[in-house]
Each structure stands twice: as structure tokens, then as C-alpha cells.
Image: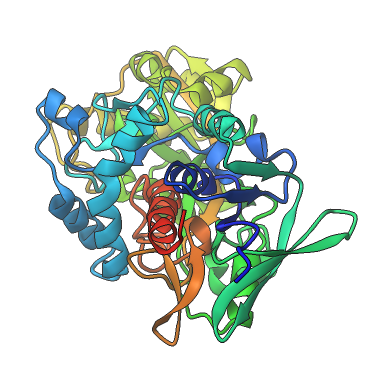
Amino acid sequence: MTSPEFDLVVAGAGGGLVAALRAAELGANVLLIDADEHFQRGNNTSMCTAMIPAAGTRWQDAAGVEDGPHRFLDDITRKTAGTADQRVARALTEVSGALVTWLADIQGLDLELVTDFRYPGHTADRCHSIPGRHGSHLLRHLVHRAQAHPRIELITPMSLREVHTVDGRVTGVEIASPDGNTERLTTGAALLATNGFGADRDLVRAHMPEIADAHYHGGQFSRGDALRIGERLGADTGFLDAYQGHAALSSRSQTLVGWATVVHGGIVVDSTGRRFAPETTGYSEFAALLAARPGSAGWIIIDEHIEELCSVFDDFRTVAESGSLVRAATATDLADAIGVPAAALEDELTAAHSAAAGLEPDRQGRTDTRHPLTAPYIAIAVKPALFHTQGGLVVDEHARVLAHGAPIPGLYASGGAAVGISGHGAGGYLAGNGLITALGLAYLAAEHVSSTVTV
């Protein structure tokens, strides 16, 4: 029997890098392709804040944080009101600790536990990130590791056109260059890591109409390729209405302001100068709330203390350097500067300060412990955005794609190409769900592939 040209073909050099690196480490020969020659600055991994949620890690132990896979799973279940895919969620929470340990010890990532703030929905400090807290640094590091590995061949731009099967088992793939030239390769395994369908407006409007008119802030090659390839093979799909929205994209710089501004004590007002929802509901579902306000836009209001705390984020510094921060000594001056009714904004800031100081209940029902905003104030114009979709091909605990509930031998999916762990809609998204699904399912796929091939 002739050996395949590659043990694994990975389509998508975002989270797919983890699959390539892990499989190659275990002895597999890997082809890694990406349709975007500029993927290092254009895919969703490169745009994220590099927050990898993981439970029961040595970083948590060192910080005295009590956590574990069961608690992480409970948080996912609570945030999604029990609608998350439990098999995938359990597999990801259980592998999360091993994943971040491998990224640090084997791949050399300088990981740290984020303890200066906590995103809504997490009951423990479990987000692990890197200095600068930006996905471009994470991606660049993994790309360099892949380029240096003798068992990994990285080719861009190159897209996956088809996955071929014989008797239901993967036997090869068809890849294509931008000029239309195609090539058929033999392989026993293919990982679809091409993200979701956020760049396909028709699919977005069909499955998540409430966010369809918002700005799309994701990879332009996230066009649903995995869905189409999988469906031609009879694959099951699920949670196609799920997505990560964001209510903190700078209107001026088109850069993520970051929800840390809010978690530290900032508030969000609309064009009338009024708050309209509890900001601790989460930045994903808040995007649709903001989209429904007058003009589909608003302002994040912070102060200089919060500005200093958020300056650890590369994205926030980029927003500041773009001139997006509007400063004012008083609430009245701030209202004049941003064009909202002064009486309304002053009333909201006074009430928000009193609530944060524990002097009165919060008007919107916000209950978190936070810094009371104090003049001088800073306002940042924001608009709602769709970052990435969270549904796709149904997979099992090994990231194997399922058809009528049974695995398609040799076919795997990860990240936005697969069902996520965010349940339905935007409300179930827990910070880091996108990255743990992208990296974690890729890691699980690589381990399963390596257990089935002779190396």
C-alpha cells in the first residue's frame, strides 16, 4: 500500500498552527495551507486579545487561584443557560491545562495569568495571555515555530477546495492557488481550520440577522468554506446562529478598545447620553444591544485611572495613539465635546459613581465591584461589531467531524469551522471561547491523528 504524501493536511493557519505543531511533534508529516497570504495580520487569531482560558494550571496554583475543569465547564453551562455542546465543552475544559502547559514548555510562549481584571461569566482568574495581550504576537510566534519544523510544509496563498473520500474515509484533498491551478494530494486526515462564515453576509443575515448590519471585524477569508466542504460530505451542522459580537470597537481607529475598560468601571452610553443596559452582561451580547440604539453607536466613558490599567493592551494603546480618546475636566465639558445632552450624561455619571461606591443600587442592575469613575473623564466612540461566528460542523471530543452522529474517518474541524461552546446567539459567548475552541480542538485533532498513523 502506498503511503500518503502527508499524514495530515491543515487548512487554516490560525489555530491550525497548533494542530500542525502538535502532530509534527508526534511524528506526523504535515501540510499547512492558508488562503490568505497576509494571514499573519488578517485572520481572527491575529486580531484577538490572546486570552486562552484554562483551568487547573500551574500559573493559577502560583497565584492561589482555585479552579479546575469542572468549574470551567460549570461557567460555560451557566453562561449558555445549558445550551452549549456538552461533549465539546467537557473535552476543551479538560484539555485546557495541558494545552497552555504545552504552549509554554514545548512551544516557548511567554504565558502569564491575567489577574488584574476578570471578564463577565468567569468565576475564577483563568485567562492566560502573553505580554501585550495581542493575537498577532501569539500567531507570529507559532508561525516561526512551524516554519522551523522539518515535518511541516507551510504554503500560502493556497486554499482547500475539496476533501476526497473512499468508502467514507478521507483519502486526499484538492488544493488551489489564486490563479486557479489545482493539485490533488493524498492524505489520511484533513483538519478544517478555516474559521467560520462571518465574511459571508448572506449566511450571516440568514442565521444571525440582528448583527448582520454591524461592522464585520474578522478575517476576510472566513467565508464558510468548511461548511460547504463538510456539507458535501454529509456532515452534521449545529449552532449556526451563534457568534461573538463586540460592543467596544473604536469608531475612529477600527481597533478594539477592549472590554477591560468596562470591567474596570467604565460605562457605556448611547447618543442620548444615557446608559441602556448592565455592562456586565458581556461584550458579545452587548453588541446587539448597542446596534439597536439610535445611530447604532455609543461611547465608553472611563477616567485616567482606568486608562492606566488598560494600557497593558496593545490594542488600547493603538486606540489612544489614533486620537480616539476625548478628554474633559467635567461631565458638562465632556457632553459638549461628544455631542450628547449634558444633563443626561452628568446624571448618569453621578449615579454610576454612587452605585460603584456602594451608596445606591445601580440603575441598570450592575452588581460587580468596580472603580467609581472620577473626573477628569475620557470618552471613546464605539460601534458594535461581529467578530466571528461560533457554529459550524458538529464534532466529537476528538474534533472528528460527524455525519448522522458518526465520525467521518480522517476529517476534523476546529475553531469557527466547528460547533463552538457558546450555545445559541450572542449571549452564551464567554471570553476566550473562540480561542480555546480554535487552539483546543486543533490540539485534540492532532493527538487523535497521531494515534491513528504509523510514524
- The coloring applied to the image is rainbow
Where is residue 263? Give x, y as percent: 31, 34
The residue closer to the viewer here, 114 or 413, is: 413
User: Eyeballing the image, is 310 above or below 153?
Assistant: above
Position of residue 419 in the picture relative to residue 280 (left or right): right
Q: Nearer the viewer, residue 250 or 10?
A: 10
Pinpoint residue 215: horizontal percent, then vertical percent.
63, 50
The location of residue 313, given as percent across then percent down, is 45, 23
| Residue 186 shows up from this direction | yes
Which residue is at the far right?
179
Q: Is residue 205 visible?
A: no
The quarter holding residue 11 reads bottom right
The residue under the point 23% across, 69% down is 82
Total numbered circles: 0
Residue 128, position in %: x, y?
32, 33
Determine which quarter of the picture holds residue 149: top right
Q: In the drawing, does residue 427 fall left or right of residue 139?
A: left
Tell me the residue at 21%/43% (across/down): 55
- For the N terminus, the image quarter is bottom right
Q: Please state if 68 lies on the left or on the right of 223 as rendered.
A: left
User: Quadrant of residue 50 in the image?
Assistant: top left
Q: Which sits in the foreground, 170 or 86?
A: 170
Q: In the image, what residue occupies the spot 35% across and 61% down?
A: 421
